[in-house]
Amino acid sequence: MNDTDMLPEIREALDLGRPVVALESTVITHGLPPPHNLETALAMEAEVRAAGAIPATLALLGGRVRYGCCACDLETLAHADAVRKCSPRDLPVVTAAGQHGSTTVAATMVLAHRTGIRVFATGGIGGVHRDTRWDVSADLEALREIPMTVVCAGAKAILDLAATLEVLETHGVTVIGYQTDTFPAFYSRSSGYPVDHRVETAEDVAALIRQRDALGLRQAILVTVPVPADAELDARLADKAIDTALGEARAQGIRGKDVTPFLLAAVSRATGDQSRVANIALLRNNARVAADIACALAQGTR
Ligand code: PSU
Ligand code: MN
């Protein structure tokens, strides 16, 4: 990695063992519409800073991996059309072509892990799709292979959550409920499915991370945090909107990596944007929790 591609404050923080939180960029290019995408990206970075850590939003600009985006990079991503959504397999294509690309959870994990960043915040991970259960997000492969800590509000509710949890179990991913006993359902606080283990504090998570590392386990730890109660979407409204969205996707023959962005936008239309409010609230909240975990981890190792 070329040092010019990493923001100096991130380089310094990593060298000194200070807390850093990775953030993904697909949520900017494909998850939220303008102007909410840029506002939310900046708000997540601000949450990380307010909690005492350094944010590192990962993306590709002109074919170069940016380990940390400045505000103008975020603006470029938020406004450019046709930025390619990059799963790990897309990374060599975009770098070779010198294009812009945004990183999914899986691609962000791959790149962040190379730098030594240990904690990452996102909205919801990808998983097993409902209609087409052979459509399984590369995020689940990355969680199996990369020993990072990923903070999320569960898997996106457009997915088959029961099947997603089973794959996480098969992959050996430790699934933790942060102040909750059940796996969150992204827009709403609970899916009803139990998590393996509940923790109350960031220090509890840091202790688990240290044990995972001491045991030499290669899997990620998935910290699931429910959406803040005041932004929660009524579960019945969410379910109805998801059914509508799935119907539209089926009718229009949406496939491959377009499925998730299509469904998120269709749910937003079907909920009169209430789902977007929930999405933004949970993204900001997850950024803060991830920063607390990164700080707790740095405390113990310095
Ligand atoms: N969470 C959000 N909005 C998003 C995504 C997650 O709140 O846009 C993105 C993430 O980058 C995730 C990706 O990795 O969707 C999953 O896409 P797929 O299902 O095609 O793997
Ligand atoms: Mn897919």
Image: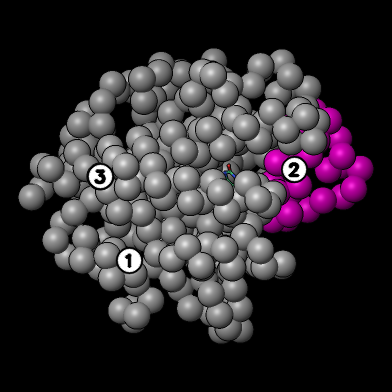
Marks 2 & 1, CB-CB < 8 Å contact: no
Marks 3 & 2, CB-CB < 8 Å contact: no
Instruction: Check disc 3: other Cα within 10 Å, few if <14, some if 14-19, many if 20+.
Output: some
Instruction: Check disc 2: other Cα within 10 Å, few if <14, some if 14-19, many if 20+.
Output: some
Q: CA distance from mark 2 to mark 1?
A: 32 Å
Query: Which residue extends farthest right?
Result: 251
Q: Which residue is found at the position 83% from the left and 43% from the top?
A: 249
Foreground disc of the pair 3, 2: 3
Residue beneath disc 1: 114
Residue 141 highlighted magenta (yes or no): no
Residue beneath disc 3: 52
Q: CA distance from mark 3 to mark 1?
A: 23 Å
Question: Please, what is the three-letter code of the amino acid marked with disc 2?
Answer: Ala
* Colour logic: one colour
Residue 249 highlighted magenta (yes or no): yes
Residue beneath disc 2: 265
* Residue 179 placement, left or right of 253: left
In-front residue for pair 302/159: 302
Image coordinates of residue 71 in percent, x first then y, are: 47, 63
Report whether residue 218 is seen: no
Q: Of label 3 and label 2, which has the lower sequence position? A: 3
Report whether residue 46 is seen: yes
* Residue 180 placement, left or right of 53: right
Query: What range of the chain is rendered magenta?
Result: 242-267
Q: Of label 3 and label 1, which has the lower sequence position? A: 3
Tag 2's secondary structure?
A: helix
Which image quadrant is residue 121 in? top left
Instruction: Check disc 1: other Cα within 10 Å, few if <14, some if 14-19, many if 20+.
Output: few
Question: Please, what is the three-letter code of the amino acid marked with disc 1?
Answer: Arg
Count of labels in the image: 3
Q: Of label 2 and label 1, which has the lower sequence position? A: 1
